[in-house]
């Protein structure tokens, strides 16, 4: 039996995700699928428009066997740190196969790039040279790869896949990375078929367009339709105006804090603030992550001391429960099913973030951190 790991945000769950699950089941019929997913904010610095318990219900209804939370401190970071947290959990759960979406679907090419980034000393020198020229990090990586290998990878899922492979190789994890061809492009802004990307779906939701043809049954009923980063702008603005030194926050690079302080007073909303901060050195995703870290009071000091010290179970079916019972005696990291204070700094941050997330909702979802048990599908 294969133990499959999938890392996905499901923000929201859509037909492309179902296609990935279906292909995984076709490739590995006798398998258990474990989903690692985030809770409140995404890797691209966007708010999650479905809460984690509803997300778990939807995943279980669509052939996922076990759902595990990726802590905020990893979930809202750049690709390498995001991958580090997710792969540490999946390796602890003893998966043998990692399946991820890929634009190129060329696993050997992705492995070659990962090995270059890990082991080629010239590569890091070139990246530093390009960064010193004021180029943003993803572009610097791309230019360095092109100079060494003669080609590069630029699409977001391929780039995330490379981070996954680096984490597997760098830690000697006994995990086989397997790609599944994406049927659309993350940057598509037009509907070409029923499988469309999550970014386009979120824009449709904010524009009050009907998305029922593009998501599985019941997804639309569980979405917070009016929730976006803009929902948090007044709280973010307060944080920026009242924090003396913004450079204490994770991903706020030295120097950019002055620019943020300067433009906050003239920016009317979140999107305008991002555009006013934007320079060629910073991508939109990096700026959004930066602002999320300011909003949630996530500091560099906190980020410097993170390590997976618990595994939080969000949901499971009978197969997932049986698998947990088999492996738990061999796992030193404790499983938890609900929030308890002072057992982990990472978990305490998760609770804090849930309270901030609740500020934009009509209900105090942070209370569910204490009350909710894992979702069980019988």
Image (spheres, rainbow, N blue to C red):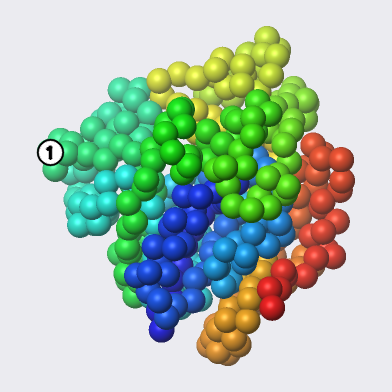
**Numbered circles on residues, count:** 1
Residue 195 appears in the picture as rendered: yes
The front one of 188 and 347 is 188
Where in the figure is residue 254, as x and y percent of width and height? 52, 29
Residue in the image at 52% along x and 24% along y: 255
Element under disc 1: loop
Residue in the image at 44% along x and 47% along y: 79
The front one of 340 and 16 is 16
> Is 263 left or right of 244, judged from the image as shown?
left
| Disc 1 packing (10 Å; few <14; some 14–19; many ≥20) | few
Q: Is residue 33 above or below residue 195?
A: below
Where in the figure is residue 113, as x and y percent of width and height? 23, 50
Q: Quadrant of the N terminus?
A: bottom left
Residue in the image at 71% along x and 73% along y: 376
Q: Is residue 143 above or below residue 311?
A: above
Q: Is residue 297 above or below residue 308?
A: above
Which residue lies most toward the top here? 266
Residue in the image at 30% along x and 22% along y: 133
Where in the figure is residue 125, as x and y percent of width and height? 23, 39
Residue 312 appears in the picture as rendered: no
- The residue singled out by tag 1 in the image is 150
The quadrant where residue 266 appears: top right
Q: Quadrant of the C terminus?
A: bottom right
> Is 258 left or right of 15, judged from the image as shown?
right
The front one of 182 and 371 is 182
Where in the figure is residue 26, as x and y percent of width and height? 38, 69
> Is 279 left or right of 302, judged from the image as shown?
left
């Amino acid at each position: 039996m294969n133990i499959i790991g999938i890392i996905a945000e499901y923000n929201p769950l859509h037909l492309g995700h179902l296609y990935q699950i279906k292909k995984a089941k076709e490739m590995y019929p006798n398998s258990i699928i474990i989903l690692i997913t985030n809770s409140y904010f995404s890797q691209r610095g966007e708010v999650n428009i479905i809460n984690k318990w509803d997300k778990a219900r939807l995943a279980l209804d669509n052939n996922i066997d076990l759902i595990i939370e990726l802590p905020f401190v990893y979930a809202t970071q750049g690709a390498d740190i995001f991958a580090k947290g997710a792969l540490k959990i999946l390796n602890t759960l003893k998966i043998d196969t990692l399946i991820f979406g890929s634009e190129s679907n060329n696993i050997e090419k992705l492995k070659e790039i990962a090995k270059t980034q890990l082991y080629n000393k010239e590569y890091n020198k070139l990246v530093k040279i390009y960064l010193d020229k004021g180029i943003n990090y993803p572009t610097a990586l791309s230019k360095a790869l092109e100079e060494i290998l003669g080609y590069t990878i630029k699409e977001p899922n391929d780039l995330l896949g490379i981070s996954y492979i680096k984490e597997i190789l760098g830690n000697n994890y006994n995990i086989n990375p397997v790609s599944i061809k994406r049927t659309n492009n993350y940057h598509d802004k037009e509907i070409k078929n029923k499988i469309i990307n999550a970014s386009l779906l979120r824009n449709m939701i904010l524009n009050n367009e009907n998305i029922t043809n593009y998501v599985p049954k019941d997804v639309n009923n569980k979405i917070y339709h009016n929730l976006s980063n803009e929902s948090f702008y007044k709280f973010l603005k307060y944080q920026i105006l009242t924090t003396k030194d913004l450079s204490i926050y994770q991903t706020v690079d030295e120097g950019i804090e002055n620019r943020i302080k300067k433009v906050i007073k003239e920016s009317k909303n979140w999107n305008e603030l991002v555009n006013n901060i934007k320079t060629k050195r910073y991508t939109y995703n990096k700026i959004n992550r930066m602002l999320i870290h300011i909003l949630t009071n996530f500091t560099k000091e906190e980020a410097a001391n993170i390590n997976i010290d618990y595994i939080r179970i969000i949901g499971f079916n009978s197969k997932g429960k049986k698998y947990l019972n088999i492996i738990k005696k061999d796992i030193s990291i404790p499983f938890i099913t609900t929030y308890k204070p002072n057992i982990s700094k990472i978990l305490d941050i998760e609770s804090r973030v849930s309270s901030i997330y609740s500020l934009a909702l009509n209900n105090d979802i942070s209370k569910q951190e204490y009350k909710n048990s894992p979702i069980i599908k019988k």
